Amino acid sequence: MSRLSPARSAALAALLEADRSGAFVRDLMDELPCARSLDQRDAAFALRLALGVSATKGCLDEALDAYVAKPGKVQRSIRMALRIAAFEIIYLGSEPRVAVSQGAELVRSRAKSAVGFANAVLRRVAEGREAFLAASDIVSDERAVVSMARRAGVPAWLAREMLASMGDAHAQAALDAQLEPAPLAIQLNPRISSIGGVELYDTPLVGAFRVLDRAGLVGSGALRRDDAASSDLNAQIIATAAIRPGSTLEIGAGRGTKTFVMGCGRSRMGLAAQHVACDLSAHKCDLNRSRLIGAGLDRGISFAAGDCRDLDGVLSQLDSGAGERLLFDTVFLDAPCSGTGTMRRHPEIPWRLQLDDTVSSLPELQLELLVEASSRVAPSGELIYATCSTLEAENDRVVERFLEMPQARGFQLAPVSESYAYTLPDFEQASAYVRDHETETGCFTTYPAHDAFDGHFCARFIRIA
Ligand SMILES: C[S@@+](CC[C@H](N)C(=O)[O-])C[C@H]1O[C@@H](n2cnc3c(N)ncnc32)[C@H](O)[C@@H]1O
């Protein structure tokens, strides 16, 4: 009998709690006493196990259930312990003897009577690893796509959608990188020029830096002091495309990472803010407000909470204060989406998402919000539509469907690389970066890959007077 490692034990506790409460496992690893008491090395391993199991759980169940007579009868805590060991065997390529015996110990910690069962199942998972990843059990021409999906730990339907939307090369690169950590970037508050003890690496965008030392950044307190915000480079590129002189309506502002990036950008460009940030969630609006106050970037920014499918309702107070139905020089919709471009950061996404969300319910919501947003664009104003999805149904298809609607009369697509900020001399490098990632229609489109930033999409419409 070997001794159970505290890292595996903490990963199991966090995964069970996440499953019970719906909380994010990453947050629980920061909160649970058994995880907080781990030394740095064990904490990193526990986090890797917890995130990895969340990201691949459907595939782990498939691999395990092939050797279980009655899968529906396996207790929740035993299944979770088995998933941890199966993750080590299949995705970390750990020494099978160690992974099997640690898996059996994990199971023993929850139910002594199931140790023999756990040993038998895990040994067979280890023996069948290569065949499972190669999808040798699939006899149809689906074998290749199932194998791709299993290697990345995502559902087969999602791999299929990614192939159809992104093309073979981008989809393969994104799936290959799916279990790697995403690169870290920050936007630096213009009130400071460096973060003590943390090396900042230039990116093509002024004010955006890449950081390699994640722990150093957190330890520096810069994020807590609002001296910086962590934000993917491509998300920052999109927020910057929405900075223009005049008034701005931001829809789907959430906790305000892009509001922060826009505030920093405006300050660098010497522009004043006349910005209304809206979100369905009043709590997120509060978080956005307090970060901007902490950052000293709140001047000229107001907030409105509510369902933006009814903008007249959400903006009613502001409209009555102004004595007119307000129109804005820029309307920026950061739409609710599948988040498929950011799955490396959010391991829960692949197994929470359903096919219907990506092909139907989200695109319908996105189109409804886009039509509503367009009704608030001033003549000669701009409408920016963004998602962090890599799927065509939420991106180009929504844009095409919008342009076919009567409400889109007077709007035309324009290249993102020609938006106000990207015509300024300081943003020349960023403008070149945007051009490199622009499609024929001028939409900014990126895909995750090894050492690349996340998948994002942005379309820019101009309202002709
Ligand atoms: C992509 S996230 C926003 C991320 C945010 N812009 C940021 O940079 O941190 C989309 C946001 O849309 C909001 N949302 C969803 N449905 C909405 C609706 N009907 N009206 C307004 N906001 C909505 C969600 O609460 C979520 O915060």
Image (cartoon, helix red, strand yellow):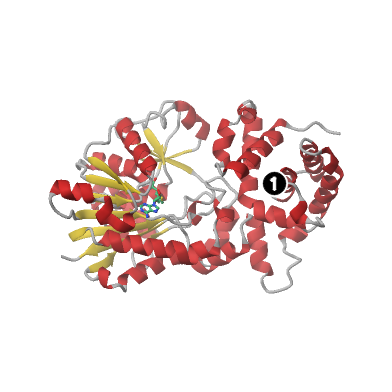
Disc 1 is placed on an element classified as: loop
Q: Give left or right: position of 143 versus 353.
A: right
Q: Amino acid at mark 1?
A: Leu
Q: For the point 53% across and 47% down, which residue is it?
A: 346
Q: For the point 43% across and 27% down, which residue is it?
A: 221
> x%, y% of residue 337?
44, 56
Q: For the point 72% across and 51% down, which residue is it?
A: 90
| Crowding near the residue tagged with mark 1, few <14, some 14–19, many ≥20 C-alpha atoms within 10 Å | some
> x%, y% of residue 249?
26, 51
Q: Give left or right: position of 224 versus 76.
A: left
Residue 73 seen in this snapshot: yes
> x%, y% of residue 93?
73, 47
Q: Nearer the viewer, residue 113 or 334?
A: 113
Tell me the quarter of the image containing the C terminus: bottom left
Q: Nearer the viewer, residue 385 or 440?
A: 385
Q: Give left or right: position of 113 versus 219.
A: right
Residue 417 seen in this snapshot: no
Q: Is residue 296 above or below residue 54?
A: above
Q: Give left or right: position of 303 versus 388.
A: left
> x%, y% of residue 169?
54, 64
Res 4 quadrant in image: top right
What is the total number of numbered labels drawn onto the structure image? 1
Q: Does mark 1 have its CB less than 8 Å from ligand 1? A: no
Determine which residue is flagged by label 1.
92
- Give the residue at the far left of this rendering: 323
Tell me the quarter of the image containing the N terminus: top right
Q: Nearer the viewer, residue 438 or 22?
A: 22
Q: Is residue 82 above or below residue 30?
A: below
Res 159 quadrant in image: bottom right
